[in-house]
Amino acid sequence: MELNVTKDRCLALTAQAESTAAQPVSAPDPALLTGPHAALKLGLGGFKKVCRLEEDTPCPFPGLPSGFLEMRVKEGSKIRNLMGFAMARMQGGGGGDGDGRQGSGLRQVVFTGSGRAVTKTITCVEIMKRKMGGLHQVTKLRYKGVREVWGSDEGGGSEMTVHRTVPSISILLSKDQLDPQEPGYQPPETHGTLWEEGDGLESPQDPGKRALRLTDLSGQPQSKRVCLQGGSSVE
Amino acid sequence: MAEPRSPVSATVPQTPMGLAPPEGAVVEMDPVEYTLRKRLPRKLPKRRNDVYVNMKTDFKAQLARCQKLLDGTAGHREICIHGLGLAINRAINIALQLQAASQGALQLAANTSTVELVDDLEPEDPDEAGEPLTRTRNNSAIHIKVFYPNPQ
């Protein structure tokens, strides 16, 4: 974590920021991943995020033939926009009917997203898998460096750069067979089966036992939730 | 009409003005008020080395739990971290933290899936003729296998 404060009026902040940065951080600390945001917002009302630059990282899928489509999913991206574009490219210009789907259209697409866009990235992939079918998938996780510039809205001049690491996900979807030995590989048409069986489940569980435990589980939290949401209504 | 916000009581003159419970905006969407109750995701396979990450428990506690599973006395060669919806981020974070703490000894293999969730809509007022409804929706989930490669 690195902080460059350009003006002296942020002294209080520097002290605060350094105290967090002083922790032994060999690996990015979990508290730092979410912490600075809140701390900065609270401690320094008046600072706003000016811009957010993602650092360039090499493609997580080496050896991918050129001409694949890369979709960078951002926090504010609309799923319909992303999917409209990606589906059109994968199915080819003709709209994807009959063997036109095989002939035209791209063979691979990579969805990447970091931070709060991770969930959206996965959702896009799941939608595409459901719509197209027969797609091989490889999922990669890693940390990504993000440089954020925060500026004060009052003074105008003061600015500061924060370097953070956020989790990011890259998912490759391919119409062609991929290496099944690759960590994170998923064959086509596994909808729904993963959650029930778990990947690499060694011993099948006794269904009766599982059901019993489920009822135990479902009793408690539900009644709790009723109390919590008692007053709320659907709007 | 003196009161601009009560189109309902205008059509039903018997109801005293002040008591008209549903406001215009609500009535347009839903004649009866419902309580939205989310059911738990169904069928959770639970082995010793399965960890379901949620957003209620403290992050560090969940990270420590995973770490313990990996290097405790019953040290597992692999654990499975599951995250649903908002907890996906946290699941990824935990997995990456474990990997970073192991100095690269651990490997990650992530899979994604879709989970069907069921919401119950229960009428707020039992007198009104609202039937209990259910609504299904999908949410994304991630399953991360955290493992030591080539086990001996």
Image: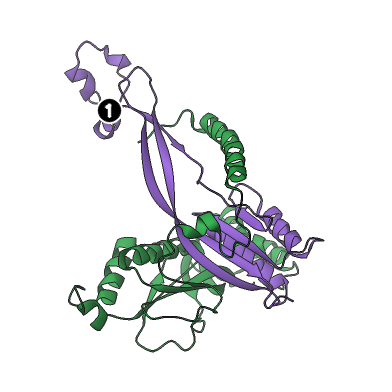
Chain colours: A green, B purple
Residue occupied by mark 1: B31
Corner quadrant of residue A143: bottom right
Q: Is residue A162 visible?
A: no
Q: Is residue B117 above or below residue A153?
A: above
- Tell me which amino acid carries mark 1: Pro
Give the residue displayed 68% in from the left and 61% down from the top.
Answer: A16
Coordinates of residue A154 in the picture (x, y in percent): 49, 59
Q: Secondary structure at mark 1?
A: loop
Q: Which residue is nearer to you in this view: A152 or B130? A: B130
Coordinates of residue A172 in the picture (x, y in percent): 43, 76
Q: Which residue is nearer to you in this view: A170 or A204? A: A204
Give the residue displayed 22% in from the left and 18% down from the top.
Answer: B9
Q: Is residue A203 visible?
A: yes
Corner quadrant of residue A64: bottom left
Q: Is residue A155 above or below residue A94?
A: above
Which quadrant of the figure contains the N terminus of chain A?
bottom right
Corner quadrant of residue A73: bottom left
Left of B10 or right of it: where is B49?
right
Q: Residue furthest right?
A: B73
Coordinates of residue A167 in the picture (x, y in percent): 56, 68
Task: Please state the chain letter of the residue tagged with numbered disc 1 in the rendered image.
Answer: B
Left of B115 or right of it: where is B20?
left
Give the residue displayed 64% in from the left and 48% down from the top.
Answer: B57
Give the residue displayed 32% in from the left and 25% down from the top.
Answer: B130
Q: Which residue is nearer to you in this view: B35 or B3? A: B35
Which quadrant of the figure contains the C terminus of chain A?
top left
Q: Is residue A40 above or below residue B126?
A: below
Left of A71 or right of it: where is A85?
left
Coordinates of residue A109 in the picture (x, y in percent): 37, 77
Judge the density around disc 1: few (<14), some (14-19), many (≥20) Cα neighbours within 10 Å: few
**Count the marks: how many?**
1
